[in-house]
Image (cartoon, rainbow, N blue to C red):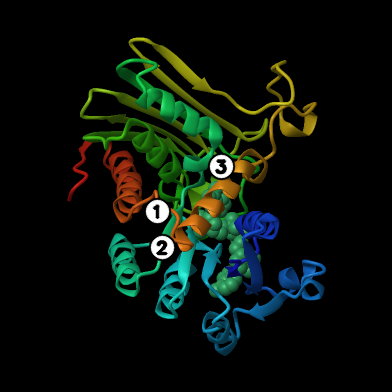
């Protein structure tokens, strides 16, 4: 059985999901709902391949799309502040929802929307694609199998490239909930526990980011009940390319998931001068992870698998990101309780 899908938003993340949906043989892309007509038109050959374009500005058309019986689920890749309305409408129309992180801006809304998904008995998936990256999955598996013994330290380094537009940053919700949320989720998922305290420092090196009241560089330390310490190193802009690394150190050894590179000679120069050993950005680095998360959701829709990312996971990640931000602003360590 092939599942019918609607894609909302055809920007950076939407383009990644568009390609993944089109590559996936178990689903048919029936509609693309995009606010900007020009962007919608720029995707050539859509109509000729039987894909109907609907404009988000035309609300009656959006309802019609959501009420189409051929549609089984929606993929939401619009700006964060628009998620809540689209996700609620899709669930109320009885569709499954695959949504870019976060599901909504407030934690109360996230919890309510999960409850609505339970009420209508449709899967709601918060797309933390790093859990579906084969390298990170391998590290998790090996940590869980005791390969490095008792974990002492887990480190992530996530330096973004290219710098997102100011327009994106203005609506991103800030660096903690937009970027750190991925790393805190990844660390908790690998360790299988949530921290008891978090501490963060941050700075804005770029004036236009400081003007938004946001930051572009973050350092986070978290302590877990097992004693494990997490160190998270984040940057909004790495001039030398997309830099994503993970390291786990335990009493029996160390695991490192390095960057995927074209060669092993290291030369850390600005992108414009480089010979091209780093990947450009998230669509290239996480291509396999995006395919895997979509396939996971299709399995869930077909009743073959249980969702591997729960309501609690989605809420804890955002609560942790918010607590890191509170720690930075208050200049102190903050105790954290996962079950609050
Ligand atoms: N998982 C990841 O690695 C990752 C990476 C990037 C972005 N994201 C998430 O994806 C979401 C989108 O980010 P982006 O960088 O693609 O933004 P973007 O600004 O590049 O794209 C958003 C698109 O949605 C369209 N749009 C706006 N409102 C709409 C509406 N109501 N209906 C239909 N279309 C609408 C815009 O015209 C634009 O084309 C954000 O929530 C972000 O957090 C996740």
Q: Is 19 on the left or on the right of 62, as rendered? A: right
Residue where numbered disc 3 is placed:
206
Q: Is residue 252 above or below residue 62?
A: above
**Cβ(mark 2) to ligand 1 < 8 Å?**
no
Q: Which quarter holds ligand 1?
A: bottom right
- Give the mark nearer the N terminus: 2 vs 1: 2
**Cβ(mark 3) to ligand 1 < 8 Å?**
no
* Mark-to-mark CA distance, 3 and 2: 36 Å
Q: Are marks 2 and 1 in contact (CB under 8 Å)?
A: yes
Residue where numbered disc 2 is placed:
124
Q: Callout 1: helix, strand or loop?
A: loop
Q: Callout 3: helix, strand or loop?
A: loop
| Residue drawn at (78%, 71%) of the image | 49
* Mark-to-mark CA distance, 1 and 3: 39 Å
The spot of residue 86 in percent (x, y) is 47, 73
| Residue drawn at (72%, 74%) of the image | 51
Residue 216 — which label?
none
Based on the displayed image, in which of its 4 quarters is residue 54 positioned? bottom right
- Give the mark nearer the N terminus: 3 vs 2: 2
Q: Is 324 on the left or on the right of 248, as rendered? A: left
Q: Callout 2: helix, strand or loop?
A: strand
Q: Is residue 13 above or below residue 74?
A: above
| Residue drawn at (42%, 69%) of the image | 84
Based on the displayed image, in which of its 4 quarters is residue 183 positioned? top left
* Mark-to-mark CA distance, 2 and 1: 8 Å
The spot of residue 154 in percent (x, y) is 39, 24
Residue where numbered disc 1 is placed:
307
| Disc 3 crowd, CA 10 A, few/some/many (<14, 14-19, 20+) | some
């Amino acid at each position: 059985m092939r599942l019918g899908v609607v894609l909302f938003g055809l920007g950076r993340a939407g383009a990644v999901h568009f390609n993944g949906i089109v590559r996936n043989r178990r689903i048919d892309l029936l509609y693309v709902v995009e606010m900007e007509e020009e962007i919608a038109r720029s995707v050539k050959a859509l109509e000729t391949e039987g894909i109907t374009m609907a404009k988000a500005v035309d609300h009656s058309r959006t309802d019609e799309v959501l009420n189409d019986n051929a549609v089984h689920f929606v993929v939401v890749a619009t700006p964060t502040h628009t998620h809540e309305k689209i996700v609620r409408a899709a669930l109320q129309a009885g569709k499954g929802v695959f949504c870019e992180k976060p599901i909504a801006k407030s934690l109360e809304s996230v919890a309510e929307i999960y409850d609505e998904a339970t009420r209508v008995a449709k899967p709601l998936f918060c797309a933390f694609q790093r859990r579906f990256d084969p390298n990170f999955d391998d590290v998790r598996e090996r940590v869980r199998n005791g390969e490095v013994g008792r974990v002492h330290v887990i480190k992530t380094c996530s330096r973004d490239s290219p710098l997102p537009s100011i327009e994106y940053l203005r609506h991103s919700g800030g660096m903690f909930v937009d970027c750190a949320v991925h790393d805190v989720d990844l660390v908790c998922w690998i360790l299988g526990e949530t921290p008891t305290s978090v501490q963060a420092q941050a700075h804005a090196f770029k004036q236009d980011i400081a003007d938004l009241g946001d930051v572009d560089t973050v350092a986070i330390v978290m302590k877990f009940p097992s004693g494990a310490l997490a160190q998270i190193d984040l940057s909004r802009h790495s001039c030398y390319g997309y830099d994503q690394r993970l390291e786990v150190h335990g009493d029996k050894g160390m695991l490192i998931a390095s960057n995927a590179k074209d060669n092993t000679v290291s030369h850390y120069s600005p992108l414009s001068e480089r010979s091209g050993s780093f990947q450009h950005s998230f669509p290239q680095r996480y291509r396999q992870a995006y395919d895997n998360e979509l396939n996971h959701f299709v399995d869930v829709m077909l009743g073959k698998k249980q969702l591997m990312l729960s309501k609690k996971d989605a809420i804890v990640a955002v609560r942790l990101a918010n607590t890191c931000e509170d720690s930075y602003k208050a200049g102190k360590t903050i105790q954290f309780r996962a079950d609050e």
